[in-house]
Amino acid sequence: MKTPFKISWLITSLTALVSLVLYFRLPPQIPLFYSLALAEQQLAAKEWIFLFPVFSALVNGGHLLILKSIKNYEALIIKLFTGSTVLVQVVLLLAMGRILWIIL
């Protein structure tokens, strides 16, 4: 149970480190929202890149609190929950990586 959360905190730290290091290389506007109709609405200030590590940390903290409250449940449910936590972290890292890949 502890290993997946260590992995998820490692991914959160990696997300924060990458966004902090590459923040200074980013242009003033970055594409965060691809599904909006107008092209000028798809761009956001480069500070929005920090949305990924903040959301990642919030997900980790929230899932850790939920996990503490369901510690009496079946082991399979807890394993699925911790696995989904890691999966959310990987998806956030890949989403940020895709944006950075397009820009840089």
Image: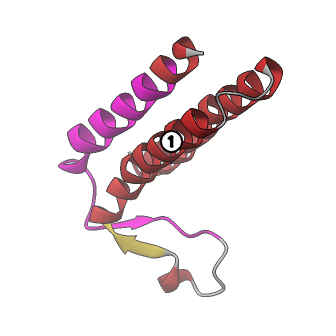
* Residue 37 rendering spot, x and y as whole percentages: 66, 86
Is 60 inside the magenta-drawn segment? no
* Residue 39 rendering spot, x and y as whole percentages: 55, 81
Q: Which residue is mark 1?
A: 65
Q: Is residue 19 above or below residue 54?
A: above
* Residue 84 rendering spot, x and y as whole percentages: 70, 34
Name the residue at the front extreme: 72
Task: Count residues near mark 1 (Cα–Cα under 10 Å), then give few for <14, some for 14-19, many for 20+.
Answer: few
What kind of element bears circle 1?
A: helix
Which amino acid type corresponds to the residue marked 1 in the rendered image?
A: Leu
Name the residue at the top extreme: 3
Q: Nearer the viewer, residue 71 or 23?
A: 71
In the displayed structure image, the side of residue 40 where residue 51 appears, left or right: left
The residue at 25%/67% (across/down) is 28
Is 9 inside the magenta-drawn segment? yes
Q: Nearer the viewer, residue 50 or 43?
A: 50
Q: Nearer the viewer, residue 63 or 11?
A: 63
Q: Is residue 45 above or below residue 82?
A: below
Q: Nearer the viewer, residue 58 or 45?
A: 58
Q: Is residue 5 above or below residue 45?
A: above
The residue at 62%/35% (across/down) is 85
Locate the N terminus and report the quarter of the image it occupies.
top right
* Residue 30 rendering spot, x and y as whole percentages: 39, 64
The residues colored magenta run 7-34
